[in-house]
Amino acid sequence: MIKKEKLVLTTLLMMLFIKGFAQMSESGKDRPLSDNSFAPDSTYKVHLLAARTNLIHDLLYVPQFGFAYGANIQLEYYPRQGHYTYNVGFTFSNHRHWDDYKFFQIRDLQFELRRYFKGGAAFTGTYLGVYAEGTIYGIGFSKTKGWEGEGGGGGLSVGYVWPLNKRGNLRMEVSASLGVFYTRYDPYVYGNPITGIEDNLYYYDYQGESSDFKKRNHQFTWFGPTNAGLHITYDLFYRKSQQKGGSR
Amino acid sequence: MKRLHLILYAIALSLSLQMVSCIEPELNLSGETTPEILPAIEIDMNVMWDIDAEWSAEWYYGWDEKDDSIWGGIGYDEPKSYQVRRYFTGDDPRARHTEVDAFSIEGTSFRRLFSYGYYDMLFWNDIESKDGTQVLVINETLDSVTATTTGTHALAREIFNMVGSGEKVSESEIVGLKNQPEILYSAYTEDVFISRDLSDYVYDPVENVYLKTIETELRPLVYIYLVQIVLFNNDGRIKGINGNTAMSSMASGVNLNTGHTNNIPSVVYFNTRLKRNIEVDGRDCDVMGGKFTTFGLCDMEPYTRSDSNYSGSRGDLKNYLLFDLVFTNNGVKTYSVDVTDQCQKQAHGGVITVFIDCGKLELPDDPEIGTGSLFIPTIEDYSNVNWEIEF
């Protein structure tokens, strides 16, 4: 049932995106979108919402696991004016190689507040952000190396955005994040860790009394680099704005 | 803007669904899986054929097709099905049996789920009698299972008073004879421990069960004796036989748990045939022969149960072979021969041989007053017949 719902939603999203792109292309042909040089009293469009993907997340290679492609989707909301934007991102990968005892499943949701140094709602150039994220994950590299857990963190991000085309609706971005990530997790193994019997089941790597067992009893805290990005951004929606004369 | 809101909602919903979609593999706690997966125990029973029986004695009687049709083959047949009694004693291997799980199985191997703790297990074979009449009587209690036999002919008690074989017949004029038991095997395994440690088991991924194989040995509780009575110097004096034959002081029952025979002597009735003109040690003889089965000698088989040892006493009982001879004047006499030594040397079955010099036998004086046999077909047919019997 959940799979069906996912399929329907994914299809719906794709259709809406395609439709949005088509409308955008028709309504804003060859007009720079973040350009402030419109004539006075004319109507123009400024970006409202953009989709972004982090290519590093999309094409991730993980040592001991291999190529672990995923899907990273971010939506950035641009206010009418000012320096700040609001960004929400989701990274999803769902690799389950049962025959090789390898798993790479990530669900990461991130919220970010960005401040672009360039003003006037341009939202390009260098920015500094603050982010918070929550993650659930299941990672397994072999019969004896597996971890499942949840975590969260936050920190600062810095990046630089530049347009890739004349209109500016397609942009490239590089970014890096620094912060803290805290996770509670359980290591797991294939087969019963007490008996050593491989019964096609995965077990918590725990050999104590069952009554003493506590889930997510392991924890790990990381301070330092938390993310790196090479992003492609594409504007999805625009809002109409009126030039009332003078520069903004 | 409405469309934008719709998209945002859809995206939020989609992300939520993706976020909560399950992370695999599902993890188990090793200690928690054991109570839910009861181990299956596979029992393999080996039938013990190499019983300590003495078959090296000279066998004159032979065993032809007619013998085979009357008494069956000489050896043991492997049973096809078994009764199983499973006694769960919980955490105490010495606890008394308070419950029993009874079932039957085909073949000598089976698989069944067990709870954690100690078990005692008893097996014995089902009886397959040709005519559907079972001689063996199984007496079950939670503590033990014993086997006895049904009764058949009787004997006038004078013979035992005379030979002092030990049978207690004080209150009766006759002695009941017992039928021969069918071949019976049993195996009793105590203290089968079903642990929670799954390393004691082998996992069967096909049937998703933990397996533990326990081998147990089925031993015979009924032994086979071949009896031959060589009649030499029979110059027509012995006309024939009526087939009445019996062996005294054999155990009347056996405990299936221990294999130990009881100390209640009984006389086992069996039939014999006469074959003429058989060469025995260079002489032309007539040979009576037959087969009988028995639990064995009284108080036989030492055993250990619940760490207690019992060696058995083998009380001072004499084994007599009793048989009828029909003389040429139609008179019948019942004879008794002490075969105690042969029986004790062949406690688990063997060949019992008796030589009779017919030239020394006297013809019954007056066969008209009765058959002369001390064997009584049924109790109702009994009439007190006194005969001088030569031993």
Image (tube, rainbow, N blue to C red):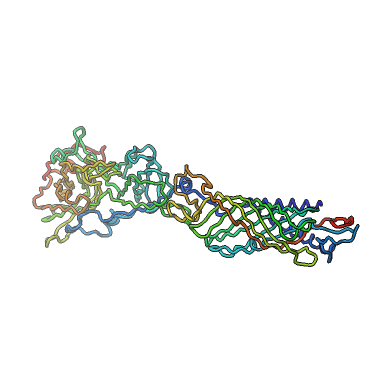
Residue nearest the viewer, comparing B160 with A28: A28
- Residue drawn 57% across and 62% down? A62
Whether residue B371 is visible: no
Q: Position of residue A101 (x, y in %)?
A: 52, 60
Residue nearest the viewer, comparing B267 with B116: B116
Side of A146 where B150 appears, left or right: left
Q: Position of residue B384 (x, y in %)?
A: 19, 37
- Residue drawn 72% across and 54% down? A115
Identify the image quadrant of residue A226. Answer: bottom right
Side of A150 where B126 appears, left or right: left
Residue nearest the viewer, comparing B242 with B51: B51
Side of B150 where B41 appears, left or right: right
In the rendered image, the vertical position of residue A23 relative to residue B173, given as above or below: below
Identify the image quadrant of residue A35. Answer: bottom right
Farthest residue to the left: give it: B360
Farthest residue to the top: give it: B171
Residue nearest the viewer, comparing A210 with A155: A155
Q: Position of residue B211 (x, y in %)?
A: 42, 52
Whether residue B243 is visible: yes
Farthest residue to the right: give it: A41
Q: For the C terminus of chain B, which image quadrant?
A: top left
Number of numbered discs on residues: 0
Q: Position of residue B328 (x, y in %)?
A: 15, 51
